[in-house]
Amino acid sequence: MPLGAQRIAIVERSLARKGFKYYHLGLSDKCDECEYKSVCSRLKEGSLYEVIDIRDKILRCLLIEEEAIVVRVTEIPIEIAIPQKKSFGTVFTYSSVKCDPSCQYYRYCVKPRSLEGKKLRIVERVKTITCPKTNEIFTIVRALVEG
Protein backbone atom coordinates (compact mmCIF):
# COMPACT_ATOMS: atom_id res chain seq x y z
CA MET A 1 0.00 0.00 0.00
CA PRO A 2 1.73 3.21 -1.12
CA LEU A 3 2.08 6.05 1.38
CA GLY A 4 -1.21 7.94 1.47
CA ALA A 5 -3.23 5.11 -0.13
CA GLN A 6 -6.61 4.53 1.46
CA ARG A 7 -8.41 1.34 2.49
CA ILE A 8 -11.74 0.44 4.03
CA ALA A 9 -11.46 -1.04 7.54
CA ILE A 10 -13.64 -1.96 10.50
CA VAL A 11 -13.01 -0.59 14.00
CA GLU A 12 -14.76 -0.79 17.34
CA ARG A 13 -17.60 1.73 17.34
CA SER A 14 -16.33 3.57 20.44
CA LEU A 15 -12.96 4.17 18.72
CA ALA A 16 -14.31 5.26 15.33
CA ARG A 17 -13.24 8.88 15.10
CA LYS A 18 -11.08 10.83 12.67
CA GLY A 19 -7.45 10.83 13.73
CA PHE A 20 -7.68 7.57 15.73
CA LYS A 21 -4.51 5.51 15.15
CA TYR A 22 -4.13 1.78 15.63
CA TYR A 23 -1.89 -1.15 14.75
CA HIS A 24 -3.51 -3.89 12.70
CA LEU A 25 -2.58 -7.00 14.71
CA GLY A 26 -3.76 -9.47 12.08
CA LEU A 27 -6.69 -11.85 11.79
CA SER A 28 -7.94 -14.30 14.41
CA ASP A 29 -9.53 -17.73 14.03
CA LYS A 30 -12.85 -16.02 14.77
CA CYS A 31 -12.40 -14.02 11.56
CA ASP A 32 -12.64 -17.21 9.46
CA GLU A 33 -16.40 -17.28 10.08
CA CYS A 34 -16.97 -13.56 9.49
CA GLU A 35 -18.64 -12.28 6.34
CA TYR A 36 -16.44 -9.15 6.53
CA LYS A 37 -13.11 -11.01 6.68
CA SER A 38 -12.11 -9.77 3.23
CA VAL A 39 -12.19 -6.17 4.48
CA CYS A 40 -9.77 -6.79 7.36
CA SER A 41 -7.55 -9.15 5.37
CA ARG A 42 -6.64 -6.29 3.00
CA LEU A 43 -4.78 -4.53 5.83
CA LYS A 44 -1.12 -5.35 6.52
CA GLU A 45 -0.42 -7.07 9.82
CA GLY A 46 1.75 -4.86 12.03
CA SER A 47 1.01 -1.67 10.10
CA LEU A 48 -0.11 1.55 11.75
CA TYR A 49 -3.34 3.03 10.38
CA GLU A 50 -5.13 6.33 10.93
CA VAL A 51 -8.89 6.77 10.54
CA ILE A 52 -9.56 9.52 8.01
CA ASP A 53 -13.31 9.09 7.40
CA ILE A 54 -16.24 7.38 9.10
CA ARG A 55 -18.97 5.59 7.17
CA ASP A 56 -22.58 5.06 8.21
CA LYS A 57 -22.39 1.25 8.18
CA ILE A 58 -22.57 -0.39 11.63
CA LEU A 59 -22.01 -4.12 12.00
CA ARG A 60 -21.17 -6.74 14.60
CA CYS A 61 -17.52 -7.82 14.83
CA LEU A 62 -17.06 -11.47 15.82
CA LEU A 63 -13.56 -10.81 17.16
CA ILE A 64 -14.38 -8.05 19.63
CA GLU A 65 -17.97 -9.25 20.10
CA GLU A 66 -19.23 -5.66 19.91
CA GLU A 67 -20.62 -3.20 17.43
CA ALA A 68 -18.10 -1.96 14.90
CA ILE A 69 -18.22 0.68 12.23
CA VAL A 70 -16.83 0.89 8.72
CA VAL A 71 -14.12 3.53 8.30
CA ARG A 72 -11.63 4.68 5.70
CA VAL A 73 -8.00 4.49 6.83
CA THR A 74 -4.58 5.34 5.52
CA GLU A 75 -1.35 3.59 6.47
CA ILE A 76 1.03 5.92 8.26
CA PRO A 77 4.74 5.47 9.04
CA ILE A 78 5.74 3.95 12.37
CA GLU A 79 8.32 5.93 14.35
CA ILE A 80 10.79 3.36 15.55
CA ALA A 81 14.30 3.21 17.01
CA ILE A 82 16.70 0.88 15.22
CA PRO A 83 20.41 0.25 15.78
CA GLN A 84 22.31 2.80 13.71
CA LYS A 85 24.05 0.05 11.70
CA LYS A 86 20.64 -1.04 10.32
CA SER A 87 19.66 2.47 9.26
CA PHE A 88 21.87 2.73 6.17
CA GLY A 89 19.68 0.65 3.85
CA THR A 90 16.07 1.25 2.99
CA VAL A 91 14.63 -2.11 4.12
CA PHE A 92 15.35 -3.93 7.38
CA THR A 93 13.90 -6.77 9.44
CA TYR A 94 12.39 -5.52 12.69
CA SER A 95 13.45 -7.04 15.98
CA SER A 96 12.39 -5.55 19.28
CA VAL A 97 14.71 -3.49 21.44
CA LYS A 98 14.74 -4.01 25.20
CA CYS A 99 13.90 -0.76 26.91
CA ASP A 100 12.91 0.42 30.37
CA PRO A 101 9.34 1.82 30.49
CA SER A 102 10.66 4.92 32.29
CA CYS A 103 13.07 5.74 29.43
CA GLN A 104 12.34 8.86 27.40
CA TYR A 105 12.74 6.81 24.19
CA TYR A 106 10.53 3.87 25.23
CA ARG A 107 7.76 4.73 22.72
CA TYR A 108 10.27 4.37 19.87
CA CYS A 109 11.78 1.09 21.11
CA VAL A 110 8.75 -0.99 22.09
CA LYS A 111 6.21 -1.87 19.38
CA PRO A 112 3.51 -4.56 19.02
CA ARG A 113 4.70 -8.16 18.77
CA SER A 114 3.01 -8.40 15.37
CA LEU A 115 5.93 -6.35 13.98
CA GLU A 116 8.56 -8.87 15.08
CA GLY A 117 10.39 -10.29 12.05
CA LYS A 118 8.53 -8.07 9.56
CA LYS A 119 10.35 -6.28 6.76
CA LEU A 120 10.06 -2.51 7.14
CA ARG A 121 10.91 0.15 4.58
CA ILE A 122 12.46 3.38 5.85
CA VAL A 123 10.69 6.45 4.46
CA GLU A 124 12.48 9.03 6.63
CA ARG A 125 15.36 9.25 9.08
CA VAL A 126 14.28 11.50 11.96
CA LYS A 127 17.21 11.75 14.37
CA THR A 128 20.03 9.90 16.09
CA ILE A 129 19.80 9.09 19.80
CA THR A 130 22.03 7.44 22.38
CA CYS A 131 20.48 4.84 24.67
CA PRO A 132 20.83 6.18 28.23
CA LYS A 133 21.29 2.64 29.58
CA THR A 134 23.66 0.98 27.08
CA ASN A 135 25.17 4.01 25.29
CA GLU A 136 24.34 2.27 21.98
CA ILE A 137 23.55 4.64 19.13
CA PHE A 138 20.12 4.31 17.51
CA THR A 139 18.44 6.08 14.64
CA ILE A 140 14.78 6.98 14.94
CA VAL A 141 13.15 6.36 11.57
CA ARG A 142 9.68 6.48 10.09
CA ALA A 143 8.98 3.18 8.36
CA LEU A 144 6.20 1.25 6.64
CA VAL A 145 5.60 -2.50 6.71
CA GLU A 146 6.63 -4.06 3.38
CA GLY A 147 4.24 -6.21 1.39
Image (cartoon, rainbow, N blue to C red):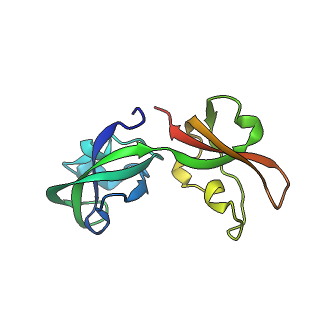
Q: Quadrant of residue 4?
A: top left
Name the spot of residue 121 as percent of width and height, x first: 56, 34
Q: Nearer the viewer, residue 59 or 57?
A: 57
- Residue furthest toward the top? 89
Q: Quadrant of the N terminus?
A: top left
- Residue furthest toward the right? 135
Q: Image check: 29 left or right of 115? A: left
- Residue displayed at 26% across by 66% down: 65
Q: Image check: 51 left or right of 103? A: left
Position of 95 relative to 60 (above/below): above
Name the spot of residue 118 as percent of width and height, x first: 56, 39
- Residue displayed at 58% across by 55% down: 111
Name the spot of residue 29 as percent of width and height, x first: 35, 52
- Residue displayed at 72% across by 57% down: 98
Q: Image check: 5 left or right of 94? A: left
- Residue displayed at 25% across by 41% down: 38
Q: Image check: 48 left or right of 105? A: left
Q: Nearer the viewer, residue 9 or 30?
A: 9
Badge count: 0
Q: Quadrant of residue 104?
A: bottom right
Position of 122 relative to 62 (above/below): above
Name the spot of residue 107 as percent of width and height, x first: 61, 60
